[in-house]
């Protein structure tokens, strides 16, 4: 039997409950005035008064004489992050993919993961660094980190930025526990529940997961081989009034694309016109054979915040991220880090990273890694072509290939089938806010060495050994 239609008053009550449930309105927030809400909803003021009175009787809101109505927070349920945003099949949910990657049984093959195998990392340099730390002063082994992190590592970052053309002072750089934590701190500083944030479509899936945690609205901008579609970017700025744009400029995740000079200049011009801040996650920068345009370099850290880490190139275990931004923002971000973490990242992790960077082996490691990855990308593309799976572009660097499937195949369905054979894939719609990438998969070329991966995909596609 069909549910009875809601009255106008009930419709208003549901609209307010929905805003509270999604944290667009949080405890202590003032509701719109009776007259303004009536105009917005196209109802009479008396209908709004009745809705507010009934919600007050339920304890959801409270009236303050001469001031208006405010959210109380009574009976507010905990927010399940997986329920934020559009409902997706579990295999297409960012949290599912992250858990399958991070919690994978050793028997599971992970061509959908986002990191390099252990034997591709500079383990000798890391062990040497650990031996050096074992001889360090006791305070290094036992103390909290400073609010901005290791001065040694920050000076090394300052020199690296200067080589790029970013004249960042020491007061414009701080360290964080990871690249993800760095973005989280920026979101805490600049966003409020209900704000709108632009991301690329497709984009790194954990951007979406993190933004859900901040209860903001996510809007995707189509991504091209040269960067975001600038016409769509301009339209989104005009129509959606976003607070932030979060992106990778170099070796974009998942597509592998890099920003062109023309697109970079257009994005910065539009950002300035519309007053939007850009968060540029540069975690894959060192995988490029030569630098492509960077928004932070062109902008000089006025409107762009540079984020990065060394988890992809050095160690995901010795986690350390960094933020480069305006001095006043760094001051506030340092306070936030104290409030949420009580101090900066682990001194052991930051000094280990600093030691490897300063020791000279890192540059050689990256040169060798870029050459090895170039061969791996070429070989992976050849093997995938046997299954009619085609890279979207040939990336300049990195370890991802963003690949289209033959007509008629759905990447979510293939992921489900392959998981039954202990092969974890990363289906396209995990990365797509608009859910328009069902015919794409992201492959990690360093995780394709086991023939069982191709056997599982071939089986999932219904192809025999000869076909």
Image: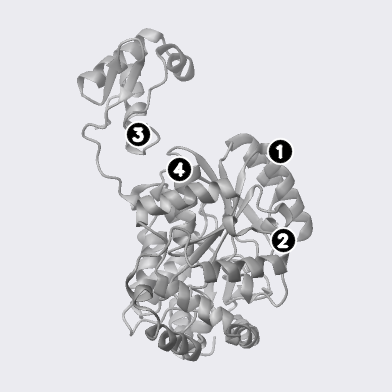
Q: Quadrant of the N terminus?
A: top left
**Rendering coords of residue 265 (x, y %):** 76, 52
Q: Quadrant of residue 92?
A: bottom left
Vertical relation: 250 (above or below) 232:
below
Label at residue 214: none
* Of labels 4 and 3, the one closer to you: 3
Disc 2: which residue: 226
Q: Considering depth in this image, is 230 or 184 the residue closer to the camera?
A: 184
Mark 3 or mark 2: name the one nearer the start of the chain. Answer: 3
* Of labels 1 and 2, the one closer to you: 1
Label at residue 216: 4
Structural crowding at the residue carrying mark 3, measured as other residues with C-alpha within 10 Å and reported as few (<14), some (14–19) or many (≥20) = some
Q: Quadrant of the C terminus?
A: bottom right
Callout 4–callout 3 Cβ contact below 8 Å: no
Disc 3: which residue: 26
Q: CA distance from mark 3 to mark 2?
A: 39 Å
Q: Considering depth in this image, is 313 or 459 the residue closer to the camera?
A: 313
Left or right position of 120 against 45: right
Label at residue 273: 1
Structural crowding at the residue carrying mark 2, measured as other residues with C-alpha within 10 Å and reported as few (<14), some (14–19) or many (≥20) = some
Q: Secondary structure at mark 2?
A: loop
Q: CA distance from mark 4 to mark 1?
A: 22 Å
Residue 406 visible to the viewer: no
Mark 4 or mark 2: name the one nearer the start of the chain. Answer: 4
Mark 3 or mark 1: name the one nearer the start of the chain. Answer: 3
Q: Secondary structure at mark 1?
A: helix
Q: CA distance from mark 1 to mark 2?
A: 21 Å
What residue do we see at 70% from left, 42% from top?
Answer: 272
What residue do we see at 57% from left, 85% from top?
Answer: 359
Left or right position of 132 against 240: left
């Amino acid at each position: 039997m069909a549910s009875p239609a809601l009255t106008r008053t009930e419709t208003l009550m549901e609209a307010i409950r929905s805003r509270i449930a999604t944290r667009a309105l949080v405890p202590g927030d003032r509701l719109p005035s009776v007259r303004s809400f009536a105009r917005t909803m196209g109802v009479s003021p008396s209908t709004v008064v009745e809705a507010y009175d009934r919600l007050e009787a339920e304890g959801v809101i409270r009236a303050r004489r001469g001031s208006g109505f405010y959210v109380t927070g009574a009976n507010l349920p905990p927010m399940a992050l997986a329920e934020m945003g559009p409902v997706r099949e579990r295999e297409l949910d960012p949290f599912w993919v992250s858990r399958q990657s991070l919690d994978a049984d050793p028997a599971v093959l992970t061509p959908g993961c986002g990191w390099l195998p252990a034997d591709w990392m500079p383990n000798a340099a890391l062990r040497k660094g650990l031996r050096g730390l074992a001889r360090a002063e006791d305070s290094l082994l036992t103390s909290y980190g400073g609010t901005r992190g290791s001065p040694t590592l920050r000076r090394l970052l300052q020199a690296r930025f200067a080589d790029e053309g970013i004249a960042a002072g020491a007061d414009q750089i701080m360290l964080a526990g990871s690249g993800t934590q760095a973005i989280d701190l920026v979101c805490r500083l600049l966003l409020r529940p209900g704000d709108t944030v632009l991301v690329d479509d497709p984009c790194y899936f954990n951007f979406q997961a993190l933004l859900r945690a901040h209860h903001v609205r996510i809007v995707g901008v189509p991504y091209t081989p040269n960067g975001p579609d600038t016409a769509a970017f301009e339209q989104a700025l005009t129509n959606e009034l976003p607070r932030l744009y979060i992106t990778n400029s170099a070796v974009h995740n998942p597509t592998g694309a890099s920003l062109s000079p023309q697109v970079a200049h257009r994005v910065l011009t539009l950002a300035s016109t519309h007053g939007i801040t850009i968060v540029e996650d540069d975690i894959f920068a060192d995988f490029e054979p030569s630098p492509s345009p960077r928004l932070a370099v062109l902008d000089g850290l006025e409107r762009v915040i540079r984020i990065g880490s060394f988890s992809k190139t050095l160690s995901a275990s010795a986690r350390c991220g960094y933020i480069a931004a305006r001095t006043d923002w760094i001051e506030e971000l340092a306070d936030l880090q104290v409030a949420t973490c009580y101090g900066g990242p682990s001194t052991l992790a930051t000094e280990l990273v600093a030691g490897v960077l300063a020791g000279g082996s890192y540059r050689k490691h990256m040169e060798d890694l870029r050459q090895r990855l170039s061969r791996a990308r070429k070989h992976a593309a050849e093997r995938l072509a046997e299954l009619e799976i085609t890279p979207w572009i040939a990336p300049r660097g990195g370890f991802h290939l963003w690949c289209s499937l033959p007509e008629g195949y759905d990447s979510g369905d293939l992921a489900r089938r392959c998981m039954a054979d202990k092969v974890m894939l990363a289906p396209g719609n995990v990365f797509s806010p608009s859910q328009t990438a069902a015919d794409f998969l992201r492959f990690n070329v360093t995780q394709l060495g086991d023939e069982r991966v191709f056997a599982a995909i071939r089986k999932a596609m219904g192809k025999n050994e000869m076909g």
